Image (spheres, rainbow, N blue to C red):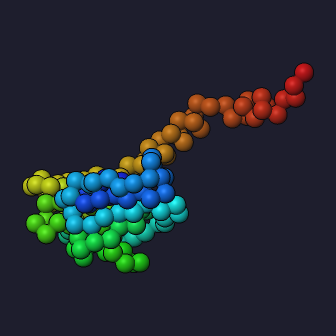
Amino acid sequence: MGICGGFQMLGRTMHDPLGLEGPPGSTPGLGLLDFETTLESEKRLTNVSGRLALGDAPVTGYEIHAGVSTGPALGRPAVYLAEGTDGAISADGQVLGTYLHGLFESPAACDALLAWAGLNQPQTSDYAALRESAIERLADMVEAHLDTGALGRLLLRQPT
């Protein structure tokens, strides 16, 4: 499995005609998926949502990459987005790649990916709920132990 640059490396070739990542030229990929990527100067940055091809699990995340990938492998997408498709799954179902960051944050998508990888009974935690709980705990500790009035007075005090 590869995400973003890892996805690009799963293809046949990576082209960098502008020398964005080093000297201009092309580099062979791993050849595990039948596509190639050309790096371009404009970077794609967008929030996306859709469904993972494995288990039809909902996914949300973002894409941030400068590569444009083309080739037959993209006809077997890994993710179906509102804007189109993304990534690829090999014909034998053993290799998956996508540009989607945040793929593991959806418990359903994470479970589907773990099942695809061979885990019999995946039980993923809700990442968003865990993060929110940690933020709330931190806020409670700050409120209980930080004298914000004294901090404010220190910040407003004029230098002598």
Residue visible at 44% across and 53% down in the picture: 24
Residue 26 showing in the rendered view: yes
Describe residue 156's horizontal placement relative to residue 131 as left or right: right
Looking at the image, residue 21 lies above or below residue 59: above
- Find residue 107 and report its image quarter: bottom left
Describe residue 100's horizontal placement relative to residue 19 as left or right: left
Q: Nearer the viewer, residue 56 or 154?
A: 56
Q: Nearer the viewer, residue 93 or 28?
A: 28
Quadrant including the N terminus: bottom left
Describe residue 63's horizontal placement relative to residue 112 as left or right: right
Residue 137 % position (x, y): 47, 41
Residue visible at 33% across and 75% down in the picture: 85
Residue 143 % position (x, y): 59, 38
Farthest top residue?
Answer: 160
Quadrant including the C terminus: top right
Count of numbered circles in the view:
0
Q: Nearer the viewer, residue 98 or 113?
A: 98
Farthest right residue?
Answer: 160
Residue visible at 84% across and 29% down in the picture: 157
Residue 101 % position (x, y): 38, 57
Residue visible at 53% across and 35% down in the picture: 141
Residue 109 % position (x, y): 27, 62
Looking at the image, residue 130 lies above or below residue 50: above
Residue 132 showing in the rendered view: no
